[in-house]
Amino acid sequence: MQATAIAQPNIALIKYWGKRDVERNLPAVGSISITLCALYTEVNVELVADLPGDVLLVNGVENQPMLPRVSACLDRVLGEKRAFARVASDSNFPIAAGLASSASAFAAMTVAAAAAANLSYTSEALARLAGATSGSAARSLFGGYAELSNSGDTINVSSLCEPESWPLEVVVAITEPGPKPTSSTVAMELSRQTSPFYDRWVLQQEHDLDVARAAILKRDFAQLATIAEHNCLKMHSVMWASRPPMVFWNAATMRCLQTVRRLQGEGCNVFFTIDAGPQVKAVCLPAEVERVRLALANTPGVQKIMTSSLGSAARLVNAA
Ligand code: PMV
């Protein structure tokens, strides 16, 4: 009655920001992501008959604040009449810092919980279950390039392209490893309720998705770069114009953008994207990765650099 699964975080190139149904966690906009291979979360779920309640260990330390979300995720996968679980989640990167740790954690937890209870679900069904807890987690059920759609009555994810078919590299510049101040769920609702740009954001998303999807299908780096940067800056503009404003960037975030602009000016195939945190992800062609890594490592304020190729889908490691 225990199982361990691994999932990798994914980085959205066309962002999910806003919910059309908070209760069912349905996104207001579709999104397109790439799954990373060097970053991972490993989750062990053990179902224990005489446990008085669920227990969560994050990187070896008991964690109460995240427990209600974890219990709700287990209820969805196993049903509410279930044994309590001991859940251990270990990540090799900073958590809750805008590096999509909830995506990898809930994707791995969903796979591990289902296997611990000997339940078999399709990837699409697992994505729906994971996505009900964290929208972006649904995308980590797939490797390479994945699309989370905003249509239909449930969470819908599909694979756009396998990682080997277009092997891009990602350089992550960590400018602040501490936790971010606002959760994505709270921040998205604040944007929907208060940002004057929110409706425009939702309206334009189909166009951005079409352009990005076409760029991926024809492996057009320049087209993907332009639309991904535009979509990222638009999402942050929605946040900046919310009340109270949500500015996740710091001075080093901005310096990293300048570094990417300089590299682009020198002909380097690279673009940036930033999620709900101050870290900068630079996406580039494999031949450019060392140049991009060095340039970002030498950017003042960058505390740590991680590089990653594209990764595969969440998967089971063992079950007994
Ligand atoms: O899935 P959540 O609730 O962690 O929200 C993800 C939000 C962003 O990372 C900013 C964008 C995205 O599409 O991943």
Image (cartoon, grey):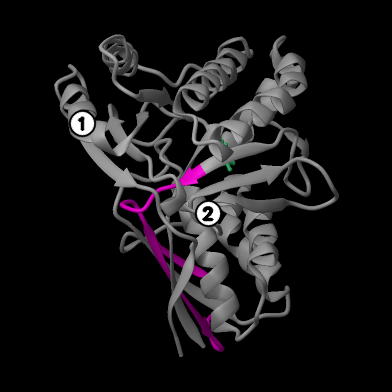
Q: Position of residue 161 (x, y in %)?
A: 54, 49
Residue 15 visible, this orientation = no
Name the side, left or right, on which 83 lies relative to 20. Answer: left
Could you tell me how many numbered marks the image carries?
2
Dot 2, how many residues are within 10 Å of its Cα: few (below 14), some (14-19), or many (20+)? many
Above-or-below relation of 49 to 78: below
Above-or-below relation of 139 to 169: below
Residue 82 visible, this orientation = yes
Q: Quadrant of residue 249?
A: top left
Q: Quadrant of residue 266?
A: top left
Question: Image quadrant of ligand 1?
Answer: top right
Above-or-below relation of 250 to 294: above
Q: Quadrant of residue 40?
A: bottom left
Q: Position of residue 142 (x, y in %)?
A: 55, 57
Q: Which residues are magenta?
A: 34-57
At label 2, the amino acid type is Ser
Give the residue furthest to the front: 218
Q: Is mark 2 within 8 Å of ligand 1?
A: no
Above-or-below relation of 269 to 40: above
Q: Does dot 2 land on a helix, a strand or a loop?
A: loop
Closer to the camera, 165 or 109?
165
At label 1, the amino acid type is Arg
Closer to the camera, 73 or 252?
252
**Residue highlighted by disc 2:** 140
Q: Which residue is drawn at the image coordinates 67% and 71% (left, top)? A: 122
Dot 1, how many residues are within 10 Å of its Cα: few (below 14), some (14-19), or many (20+)? some
Q: Position of residue 9 (x, y in %)?
A: 44, 49
**Residue highlighted by disc 1:** 293
Name the side, left or right, on which 116 lies relative to 268. Answer: right
Q: Position of residue 31 (x, y in %)?
A: 63, 37
Q: Nearer the viewer, mark 1 or mark 2?
A: 1
Between discs 1 and 2, the one toward the N terminus = 2
